[in-house]
Amino acid sequence: MSHNIESQVSGTVWKVEKPTGQPVTEGEVILIVESMKMEVPHEAVGAGTVTVLVAEGEVVKEGQLLAKVS
């Protein structure tokens, strides 16, 4: 089963903690989005292998698909 990680806020991808192909467990931070000087971590909602769909420095919108865990 695949889990989608969507942006909780509009902002800029500040840091990718787990690049594509890395194993993750539930609750691990995959990436951090900076919005209005706040860092918003986006976590895996299940265990698996991550596929990141955005790059550091990329501007994202609220609700945008950032990564998948399968």
Image (cartoon, rainbow, N blue to C red):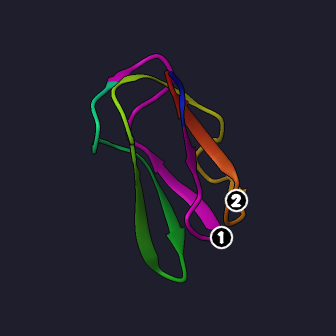
Q: Secondary structure at mark 1?
A: loop
Residue 16 forms part of the magenta stretch: yes
Residue shown at 65% from the left, 41% from the top: 54
Residue 17 forms part of the magenta stretch: yes
**Mark 1 neighbour density, 10 Å: few (under 14) some (14–19) many (20 or more):** some
Q: Say if 55 sits above or below 24 in the image.
A: below
Amino acid, disc 1: Ser
Amino acid, disc 2: Val
53 on left or right of 49: right
Q: Residue furthest bottom?
A: 36
Image quadrant in which you'd find residue 22: top left
| Residue 12 in the image, given as x and y percentages of width and height | 61, 62
Q: Which mark is residue 60?
A: 2
Q: Which mark is residue 67?
A: none
Residue shown at 71% from the left, 60% from the top: 59
Image quadrant in which you'd find residue 55: top right
| Residue 67 in the image, given as x and y percentages of width and height | 57, 37
The mark that comes first in sequence, 1 or 2, is 1
In magenta, the rendered stretch is: 4-23
For the residues labelled 1 and 2, say whether their Cβ atoms are less than 8 Å apart.
yes
Q: Say if 52 sits above or below 43 in the image.
A: above
Q: Which residue is mark 1?
A: 10
Q: Say if 17 sits above or below 9 in the image.
A: above
Residue shown at 50% from the left, 21% from the top: 1
Instruction: Return the residue nearer the eye: 35 or 8.
Output: 8
Q: CA distance from mark 1 to mark 2?
A: 6 Å
| Residue 43 in the image, given as x and y percentages of width and height | 38, 48
**Mark 2 neighbour density, 10 Å: few (under 14) some (14–19) many (20 or more):** many
Q: Secondary structure at mark 2?
A: strand
67 on left or right of 65: left
| Residue 68 in the image, given as x and y percentages of width and height | 56, 32
Residue shown at 40% from the left, 33% from the top: 18
